[in-house]
Amino acid sequence: MTSVVLGIDTSGSHCSVALAADARLAHRLAEVGSAHAEFVLSMVDAVLTEMGMSLADCDAVAYAAGPGSFTGLRVGCAVAQGLAFGGAARLVPVGTLDAIADAIPASPRSRLLVAQDARMGEVYWGTFVRGTDRWIADVPPTLSSIADLLADGRARADLGVGNAWFAFGDRLSGLVAAVRPVHGANASDVARVGQRRFDEGETVAPDEATLLYVRDHVAMTTAERAARRADPAPLAEPV
């Protein structure tokens, strides 16, 4: 029997919770800005109720561990810890770039670039190569300016995915052969990755939960916000 995993993703401006059990999946998602704490627990209750389960039925709680929103990541991790303690479950940290990559179906393309808008004119990115049945991380999550990303030969790939193409558009041209712009991961992806990792023994105790921030500088100055407003990014056409 496949493990039962509750997934939580608060890495962006959305709040998302999913419950994966065998082939069944219950999912809730809402755009909440920075108000994740006001929605996440009610979403947990909703997916448990839909599946007719309780927290005690969950083998693990998987959470988006970053990179992403500083405040959102902290809320998601804290909630996951509390739920795991309460239900005697294990935790499964899932990188947001890993979750996005995992949602991309198998293809003949051999190298994948996942790039997410990190604000302040920067990008969170990482690359993956195709394994037997999944994408395998190659370059770990990295924070770069657009100029540094374009100059980094490791970022060249066959396929690019992520919301960086919505945010920066043609400024990223030349990095990849084709683009599939997606807004990001969600709790369904986190829960599915969490199932696999739980089954493979990749878990941590609740008091060992960690986050991957990548960036130390988490707030824009007034000058930085003004500069960003003065340089709006064009929208890429999907390929």
Image: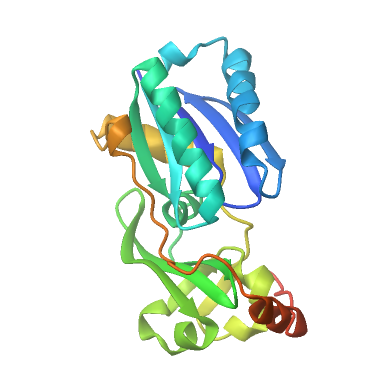
- The answer to which image quadrant residue 93 occupies is top left
Q: Residue at x 64, y 57 (%)?
A: 183
Q: Position of residue 194 (x, y in %)?
A: 39, 36
- Tell me if residue 134 comes above or below residue 61 in the rendering: below
Q: Residue at x 44, y 72 (%)?
A: 143
Q: Which quadrant is the N terminus positioned in?
A: top left
Q: Residue at x 71, y 40 (%)?
A: 30
- Asked if one can make out residue 28 in the rendered structure from this viewpoint, the answer is no
Residue 150 appears left or right of 85 = right
Seen from the viewer's position, the closer of residues 23 and 87 is 87
- The answer to which image quadrant residue 37 occupies is top right
Q: Position of residue 81 (x, y in %)?
A: 40, 31
Seen from the viewer's position, the closer of residues 201 and 218 is 218
Q: Position of residue 226 (x, y in %)?
A: 73, 80
Seen from the viewer's position, the closer of residues 98 and 210 is 210
- Asked if one can make out residue 84 in the rendered structure from this viewpoint, the answer is yes
Q: Residue at x 51, y 78 (%)?
A: 176
- Tell me if residue 235 comes above or below residue 98 in the rendering: below
